[in-house]
Image (spheres, rainbow, N blue to C red):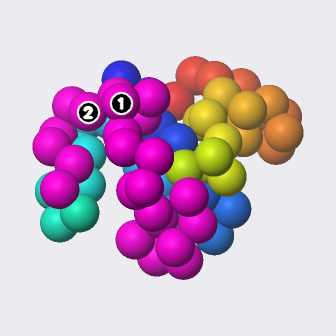
Amino acid sequence: MDNYICPCGYIYSEELGSPSRGIAPGTKFSDIPYDWRCPVCGLSKEYFGSRNSIINALNIPETY
Ligand SMILES: [Zn+2]
C-alpha cells in the first residue's frame, strides 16, 4: 500500500481509500477513475506525486 500526495498537501492513502468520494479502502491509486479529483483542492490525479518522490525531494530517509 502506498500514499500519494497532492500539491495542496492532501494525502491519498491506498489503505484508507476515499470512501466519501466513492473510493473503497484498499483501492490502488492507479485504479482510481480518471475523473476523480482531490477532495480538498479539486486537482486531478495526474498532479499527485508518490510518497517516494516526495521523500526523495525532501531527502528524508525512508525508514518511518
Ligand atoms: Zn489537492
Tell me the residue at 54%/77% (across/down).
41
The picture quadrant where one finds residue 7 is: bottom right
From which residue to which does the magenta span run?
22-44
> Going by the picture, which residue comes out furthest to the front?
35
According to the image, label 2 marks what residue? 27
CB atoms of marks 1 and 2 within 8 Å: yes
Q: What x and y, as percent, mark residue 61?
A: 71, 26
Q: Quadrant of the N terminus?
A: top left
Up the image or down, 35 lies above or below 17; here it is: below
- Dot 2 amino acid type: Thr
**61 with respect to 50 (left or right):** right
Q: What x and y, as percent, mark residue 54?
A: 72, 40
**Magenta run includes residue 59:** no
According to the image, label 1 marks what residue? 31
Tell me the residue at 47%/65% (across/down).
38
Residue 12 visible in the shown view? yes
Measure how far apart labels 1 and 2 are at the Cα level: 6 Å
Helix, strand or loop at disc 1?
helix
Q: What x and y, as percent, mark residue 34?
A: 45, 46
Mark 2 Cβ and ligand 1 under 8 Å apart: no
Mark 1 Cβ and ligand 1 under 8 Å apart: no
Up the image or down, 36 lies above or below 63; here it is: below
Crowd rating for badge 2 (residues with CA inside 10 Å; few <14, some 14–19, many 20+): some
Q: Nearer the viewer, residue 60 or 8?
A: 8
Q: What x and y, as percent, mark residue 31?
A: 35, 30
Crowd rating for badge 1 (residues with CA inside 10 Å; few <14, some 14–19, many 20+): few
**36 with respect to 59 (left or right):** left
Q: Nearer the viewer, residue 37 or 5?
A: 37
**35 with respect to 23 (left or right):** right
